[in-house]
Image: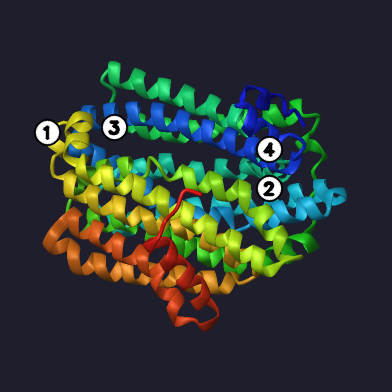
Amino acid sequence: MNDGWIRYLPGFVRKRLEGRHVLLEAIGNTGWLFADRLLRMGVGLIVGVWIARYLGPSQYGILNYAASFVTLFSAIALLGLEAIIVRDLVRYPEREREILGTTFFLRFVAGIVSYFIAVAAIFVIRPDDRLTHLMVGIIGWVLIFGSFDTIDLWFQSQVRSKYVVYAKNAGFLIAAGLRVAFIVVKAPIIAFAVANAAEIGLGAVGLLMVYRRSGQRISRWKNSFPLARRLFTESWPLLLSGIVFMVYLRIDQVLLGQLANDREVGIYAAAVRVAELWFFIPTAIVSSVFPNIVRTKENDENEFYARLQKLYNLLAFIGYAIAIPGSLLAGLIIKLLFGAPYAAATPMLVLLLWSDIFAILAVARNAYLLAMNWSWVLWLMVLAGAVSNVLLNYMLIPHYGGVGAAVASLVSYWIAAHGACYFYKPLRRTANMLTRALIYPRFW
C-alpha cells in the first residue's frame, strides 16, 4: 500500500500513524469515500438546485415522486447480498470468479423482475397519469444497470475504493453535464428522467473499465446454481430488511404524492436534498473503521464495546453539529438555494435535520447487528420504523402535508434506531449506549 500521503501531515500526527498499515488503509479508504461524496454533494447540490428552480415545485415533485417510487423496488434488485459477498470474497479468494459471476446473475435477473414490478405497480396506483408512467419506465432502468455494482463489491473486498470513485464519478459528472445542457435548451421533464438512468448506466461502463484495468475480466466469471441457492438462503433476511428499509426511507415522498399533491412532493424533496447532504459522513466512517472494531471482539470484548461506544459518541456529535446550526439557518438556506417558491420547505428541513441524528446512529447500530449475526433483529428494528412511518404518514399528511411527513420521519427514525432497542432484552445494552451518546456526544 502507498502511505506516501502521510508525509503531508503534521509531525506529531505522522509519528502516531507511521507503520500502522491497517489504520492507514482504513483512513485512506475513508478519504476516497469522502472525496466521492464531497464531489457528489457539491456538484449534485448545485445542479439539483438548478433543476428545482427550472422545473418549479410541481414538476420537480413529479421527478422526485418517480425516482422515489423506483427506489422502493431497489432492494429487490440488490437482494441484500452486499455484506455477504464482500465477506465471502475476503474469506474465499480462490472462489472469486464463481462468487462474482453468481452474484451478477442473481442481481441481473432480480433487476429485470423488479423493473417490471415497478412499472406494473405505477399503472395500478396512478392508472391515468401517463407522464408518471413514462418517468418510472425510464428511471426504472437503474434497477437493471445496478447489477454491475457487483464489480464495486470486489473493489470493497480489496479495500480499493478509489477505483470505484473514478468510475462512478465519471458517469456522475457526464450526467450532471447532461442535466445542465437540458436546462439550457429548456428540455421537458422527461429529459431529466433520462439523465437519472444515464448516470447509473455510465457508472456501470466506468466500473467495467476500471475492473479491466485492474487485470480482471468479467468474461472469466462463472455462475454456480448451488452457490446461488446458498447465497439466497443467507440473504433473504437482509433482502426483507432492505425492502422494509427502502419503504421507510422513501415512502414519505410516495405517500405525499398520493395523499397530497406533486407540488407538496417538490417542496418536501427540496428539504430532503439539503438534509441528506451530510449522510455520507457516518457511512464513510463506519464502513472504514467498523471492521477493525469487530476484530477486537475476538480478543477483548470489553475493548470492543468501549470502541463501539466511542463510535456512537462521535456519530451523535456529528449529528448535533449538523442539526443545531442547520436548524437556525434553515430559512436562509432554503431561500438562497431554492428561492421563494420553496419557502414552505423550511420547517420540513428543521425536522429532517433532527431525524438525521437517529439515522446517523442507525448506521453504526446496524453494522453492530450484522457483526453479531443478528440480521433478523435488524429486520425487526427496520420493520418497526417502517410500520410507524407509514401509519404516521397516513395520519399526518392529509392535515399537515410535507410537515406531517417530516414529523413521521423524525419519530420513525427514532423508533428504528433507538426506541425499539429497549423492547428486545439483548439490545438494551445497545439502547443504553445510544442514550449515553445522545446525552453526552463527544468528538474524541
Give how far apart the Cα atoms at labels 4 and 1 are. 51 Å
Which residue is at a point 48% across and 22% down the rendered structure image? 174
Give how far apart the Cα atoms at labels 2 and 4 are. 42 Å
Q: What amino acid is labelled 2 in the image?
A: Phe
The image quadrant of residue 53 is: top left
Nearest the camera: 444 or 214?
444
Query: Element under label 1?
Result: helix
Camera-side mark, 2 or 4: 4
Number of other residues with Cα within 10 Å of mark 1, as a class: few under 14, some 14 to 19, many 20 or more: few
Q: Mark 3 points at which residue?
A: 189
From the image, which quarter does the N terminus lie in? top right
Which comes sooner in the sequence, label 1 or label 3?
A: 3
Q: What amino acid is labelled 1 in the image?
A: Ala
Residue 217 marker: none
Give how far apart the Cα atoms at labels 3 and 2 are. 32 Å
Nearest the camera: 271 or 307?
307
Give how far apart the Cα atoms at labels 4 and 3 are. 53 Å
Give how far apart the Cα atoms at labels 1 and 3 are. 21 Å
Give how far apart the Cα atoms at labels 1 and 2 are. 46 Å
Residue 340 marker: 1
Residue 16 marker: 4
Which comes sooner in the sequence, label 4 or label 3?
A: 4
Q: Mark 2 points at which residue?
A: 104
Which comes sooner in the sequence, label 1 or label 2?
A: 2
